[in-house]
Amino acid sequence: MTSEDLKKTEKSRVVRAPTRGSYDRETTYGILDSTPLCHVSYIIDGQPFVTPTFQWREGERIFWHGSSASRMIRKCEGQPVCLAVTRLDGFVLARSAFHHSVNYRSVMLFGTPTKVEGREKELSLENFIEGLFPGRWETLRPMNEMEIKATTVLAMPIDEGSSKIRTGPPVDDEEDYALPIWSGVIPVHPAVRPPVPDPKNLDNLDIPGHVTGFKLD
Amino acid sequence: MTSEDLKKTEKSRVVRAPTRGSYDRETTYGILDSTPLCHVSYIIDGQPFVTPTFQWREGERIFWHGSSASRMIRKCEGQPVCLAVTRLDGFVLARSAFHHSVNYRSVMLFGTPTKVEGREKELSLENFIEGLFPGRWETLRPMNEMEIKATTVLAMPIDEGSSKIRTGPPVDDEEDYALPIWSGVIPVHPAVRPPVPDPKNLDNLDIPGHVTGFKLD
């Protein structure tokens, strides 16, 4: 990010904890690429809204999509938004309530999204599916004109924002380390269960590798 | 929720998909109680912000907390906010890109949070810890005045909002069911790994039941 962005980033850093900021693109991209779920916030008539959706990244831009009729999509386009991607890694149990915490990786981005149009829009939807399920796109019934029209893709440069990471054990008050209180971390992660085939699948279909190999971490 | 709230709820329902709304308190409470992570959105100078934090519920109110100095806390108090709790249950793979979806449970709440003060504030923090780790509070070094002052607890009535749930297999266009494309659901869930003791723990501490029995689903 530019030094101008870095200033904004350092400003946004004080939201949570000044020691947890990190701003290099690789860290931010790593969090975005491993965590498709995001929360987008936007304003309607002075009221904040936050909507969960999926994001994907192409180079230095972040994308999301929705029904062209959806309120979220209509109210985000051309307006200032904030987008958060949060990955919970563990519960941090300390010797005092005050020092309990969580291990996490998070990204907060600011910007004004614009519509992606034409061939780029179709390609971006292909990238979205392929990013989650490599090889699936070419096996699918192709998108038709109505579906493309009914879908809006928004994109925003990844320029302004911050990423934050907390790792490791609790940090307790020095004198509390003498207390006989079990402390530590309970790690959590998104796990995948065996796939559930659609009962309407044709007989004898192989389960594709993008299903058997699907992982979220 | 009141019929007035229900109207607002039905309005907010069109954000995603009209068939996925459900509004009874038990459904909403079930989602909130099983999913501590939330995203709170608020406005600063016309710019939306969204911040991940943890929520907990007491009766018909939702609570969250933070450093009294945090921007999120200062900008939420007495202002309109939107709070989202999202639980991802599975990836839904269809026969066309368009009908790919996700299974999820989500809650979106609107309101104006107020500070929780005095004895109620301390009790609410105890409820927060005890909700996650039953029995832990009484084992901890007690909170001191400085810590209580440095922490702000916000609460908001659970009155206006909606919950949404999607479950089940993909819903494809009728003619696409004849295609030889593997479709179905990849279920995901938050899993817990074995606890990692703080290297600074005293020797021979038993791992408490609220750690060995910790679950997120």
Image (tube, coloured by chain):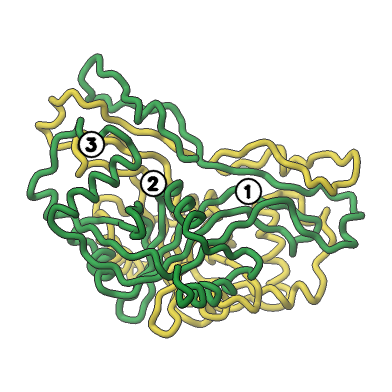
Chain colours: A yellow, B green
Image quarter hosting the N terminus of chain A: bottom left
| Circle 3: residue type | Trp
Numbered tag placed on residue A141 in the rendering:
none
Cα separation, mark 2 vs mark 3, equals 23 Å
Contact flag, marks 3 and 1 (Cβ < 8 Å)? no
What label sits on residue B90 in the rendered view? Answer: 1
Left or right side of B57 for A175: left
Q: Chain of mark 1?
A: B
Query: Who's the residue at 49% across and 76% down the image?
Result: B8
In the rendered structure, the residue with mark 3 lies on which chain?
B
Foreground tag (2 vs 1): 1
Task: Count up the numbered dots.
Answer: 3
Q: Quadrant of residue B1?
A: bottom left
The CA span between labels 3 and 1 is: 34 Å
Seen at 26% across and 70% down, the residue is: B75
Q: Looking at the picture, does residue A104 appear above or below residue B162? A: above
Name the residue carrying label 3: B137
The residue under label 2 is A104
**Can residue A203 be seen here?**
yes
Instruction: Work out whether disc 3 and disc 1 sit on a shared chain.
Output: yes
Q: Quadrant of residue B133?
A: top left
Compared across the picture, whether A119 is left or right of A154 comes to right
Are the residues at dot 2 and dot 3 in contact (C-beta closer than 8 Å)?
no
Give amino acid for label 2.
Answer: Tyr
Residue sitting farthest toward the front: B3
What is the x, y in percent for residue A217?
A: 54, 41
Residue B16, relative to residue B123: is it above or below? below
Residue A97 image point, x, y percent: 21, 41
Of pointers 3 and 1, the one earlier in the residue sequence: 1
Q: Position of residue A171 (x, y in %)?
A: 22, 38
